[in-house]
Amino acid sequence: MKRRQGEGEKRGKSPIHLQEGFTLIELIIVLIVLAAVLTITFPRMEAFFSGSYLKSTSRRLIGTIRYLHDRSATTGKRLRLCYDLDENKYWIEEENEEGEFEEVKTVLGRREALPEGIKFLDIIIPEGKISSGQTFTLFFPKGYVTKSIIHLQNEKEEVQTLLIKGTMGQVMVYEGYVEEESE
């Protein structure tokens, strides 16, 4: 198709000089603004997520504690929630017919590592405060649980306390380091 003479001039633009898109300067300015916004907001987002890891780890442990309390009652066996404070891992053990405890090899029983940046600060059991090595919380078939106080800490040194009451396996959660239940 032939172009008629003067057609481009009627519209006010020549087909050769059409401008579409952004200039390099405009793109650079947008990137600088985005970098500034991310620089300001990223530390706040990181703080939000590190706090949420601490809370989600607490929720996961509470779920495991409730599961063990119920499983001990339904199976009639003693169970242990074991903690390795050096490796920051926990797992489930079940008492066999000989009265010895064996690691449970199910999905819920396998060794679970705490998320990166979260650690066991210490665990208080009736025998005392444990800051390294291994210890456990014992669950009995009639509903009793050995009283345990678990202190979790994140990289920002924020602490969350899980207090497992001896009767009925109830778990209380406290922000900060708590050594005894507040009445």
Image (cartoon, grey):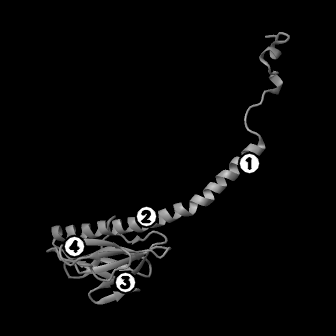
Circle 1: is it few (<14), some (14-19), or many (20+) Cα within 10 Å?
A: few
Q: The residue under label 2 is which amino acid type?
A: Ser
Circle 3 or circle 4, nearest the eye? 4
Label 4 crowd (10 A; few <14 / some 14-19 / many >=20): many
Packing grade of label 3 (10 A; few <14, some 14-19, many >=20) is some
Query: What residue does disc 2 label?
Result: 52
Q: Is residue 117 left or right of residue 102?
A: right
Q: Which residue is mark 1?
A: 28
In three-dimensional space, the C-alpha distance between marks 4 and 2, rounded to whole angstroms, equals 24 Å
Residue drawn at (45%, 66%) of the image: 51
- Please say if the residues under marks 1 and 3 sit with CB atoms less than 8 Å apart: no
Query: What amino acid is at disc 3?
Result: Gln
Who comes first in sequence, dot 2 or dot 3?
2
The residue type indicated by label 4 comes to Gly
Left or right relative to 164: residue 39: right
Residue drawn at point x = 48 percent, y = 70 percent? 116
| Residue identifier under label 4 | 169
Q: From mark 2 to mark 1, how far is it between C-alphas?
A: 35 Å
Which is more toward the observer, 41 or 170? 41
User: Dot 3 corresponds to which residue?
Assistant: 134
> What type is the residue that disc 1 sits on?
Ile
Q: Which of the 4 image quarters holds residue 100?
A: bottom left
